[in-house]
Amino acid sequence: MSSETGTPAKSAGTSGSASSSINPESVRAVAKKDFQDAVRSWLFWGLSVFFFTILVVVTGALSYFGEDIAAQGATTDMLVVFVSQITKVIVPLIALVLGWKSIAGERESGSIKVLLSLPHSRKDVLLGKLLGRSAVLSLSLTVGFVLAAVVVAALLGAFDIVDYAGLLVMSIIYGVAYMSIAVALSSLTRSTTIAGAAMGSVFLMFYGVWNGLEGVFRLLGERDILFFDTVTYTVESGGRTFELTRPEDWAYFVLNLDPGQAYSNGLTLLTDVEALEQQSAVSAEMFGGELPIFLQDWFSFLILLFWVVVPLAIALYRFDRVDI
C-alpha cells in the first residue's frame, strides 16, 4: 500500500520538475513556429517594408533639402541622427504591439493549454515566444536596412557603412529590450485587454512620465524638498563663465534607466556621429568634464541588458506559478 502511494508521489514530483525545466530544443520549436506564423501573416515582410520606407524617406529628404549637409560630407551622420529619433519611438511601439498577445492572447483563447499539452514547459513557451518575436523584429529591421542600403548610398553619395551598421545593431538591441518587457507583461495577464493597458502604460511611463522627471528633480532640488538638492557647475561660452545648477548625480542614474536614453547613449559608442558626440560633451561639462560611470556610453549596454534580463526573470518565476 505504501509502495503504491509512494509511486504516484514520485511521479508527480518528476512531472513538476519537468514543467519548470528549460529544454533548448523545445524553446527552439516554439520560437520557430512563432516566427513562421509571423511570416505567413506577412507581418515580417510588412515590418521590413516599413523600416525600408522610413530609411528611404529620410534619405530622400536629406538628399533633396540637405545640399549644405551633403557639401560638408555629413549626410550619413544626419541620417543616423534623424532615423534614430524616429526608431527611438517606433521600435518600442512595434515591440510592445508584437509582444502584446504573445502569451495573454493564448491564455484568453485557451490555446495555451494545447501548447502546454505538448512536451513544452511554461518556461519553454515563454522563452520561445520571446525569441520568436524578437527574431521577427530583428530580422525585419535587418532586411529593411539592407534593402535600403543601396538606395541610401545612391542618394547620399557619401555613405558610412560603419555608422549605418551601428544604427542597425543598436536598434536591434533596443527592440529586444522592449520585447522582453512586452512578453513578460503579457505572461502576467490572462486578458488581452489588461495586457494592452499594460503596454500602453509602459510606453506612457517612458515617453511621458520619465522624460519629465529631470524637470521635477530640478524643481524639488531648488526648493530643498525632502532629500532633493542641486549641484552648481560652471560653463564657459563666448569668453564668459556662467554658473548653472543641475540635480544630484543619483537623479541622473534614475533618468538614464530609461531604455530610450540608453539607446541614444549606445549610438555614441557604435557610431562616429559628431552631433551625438557633441551632446555627450555637453553632458560632461555638467560633471566637471568627466561623466560618472553610469552616464558613460558603455554603461548603456548594461542598462539595456537589465531591461532584457530582469523582466524575463520575473516572468519566468511568476508564469511558472500562475493558474492557466
Image (cartoon, rainbow, N blue to C red):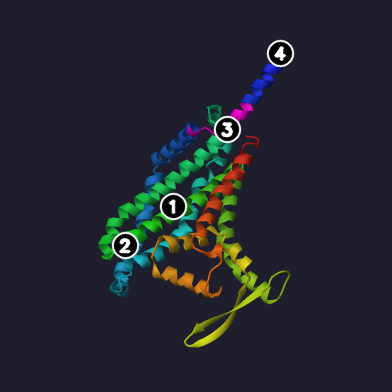
Looking at the picture, does residue 7 appear above or below residue 124? above
Along the polypeptide, which appears first: circle 1 or circle 2?
Answer: 2
Q: Is residue 117 visible?
A: yes
Residue type at mark 1: give it. Answer: Ile
Q: Residue at x 46, y 41 (%)?
A: 132
Report x, y in % for residue 10.
66, 21
Task: Using the numbered discs, state the Cα–Cα distance from disc 4 to disc 3 in whole angstroms.
Answer: 27 Å
What element does badge 1 sit on?
helix
Task: Using the numbered discs, state the Cα–Cα distance from disc 2 to disc 3 in whole angstroms.
Answer: 46 Å
Badges 3 and 1: C-beta atoms under 8 Å apart? no
For residue 3, which numbered disc appears in the image?
Answer: 4
Residue type at mark 3: give it. Answer: Ser
Residue in front for this viewpoint, 24 or 62:
24
User: Where does label 3 land, which residue?
Assistant: 21
For residue 160, which numbered disc appears in the image?
Answer: 2
In the picture provided, is 230 more to the left or to the right than 174? right
Residue in front for this viewpoint, 124 or 203:
124
Looking at the picture, does residue 107 appear above or below residue 185? above
Q: Residue at x 54, y 64 (%)?
A: 295
- Quadrant of the snapshot with the N terminus: top right
Task: Using the numbered discs, state the Cα–Cα distance from disc 4 to disc 1 in whole angstroms.
Answer: 55 Å
In the image, which residues are magenta? 15-24
Badges 4 and 3: C-beta atoms under 8 Å apart? no
User: Where does label 1 land, which residue?
Assistant: 172
Report x, y in % for residue 314.
62, 45
Task: Using the numbered discs, state the Cα–Cα distance from disc 1 to disc 2 in whole angstroms.
Answer: 19 Å
Report x, y in % for residue 219.
65, 74
Task: Using the numbered discs, state the Cα–Cα distance from disc 3 to disc 1 in whole angstroms.
Answer: 28 Å
For label 4, the crowd category at 10 Å Cα-Cα, with few meaning under 14, some 14 to 19 and many 20 or more, is few
Along the polypeptide, which appears first: circle 2 or circle 4?
Answer: 4
Along the polypeptide, which appears first: circle 3 or circle 1?
Answer: 3
- Quadrant of the snapshot with the C terminus: top right
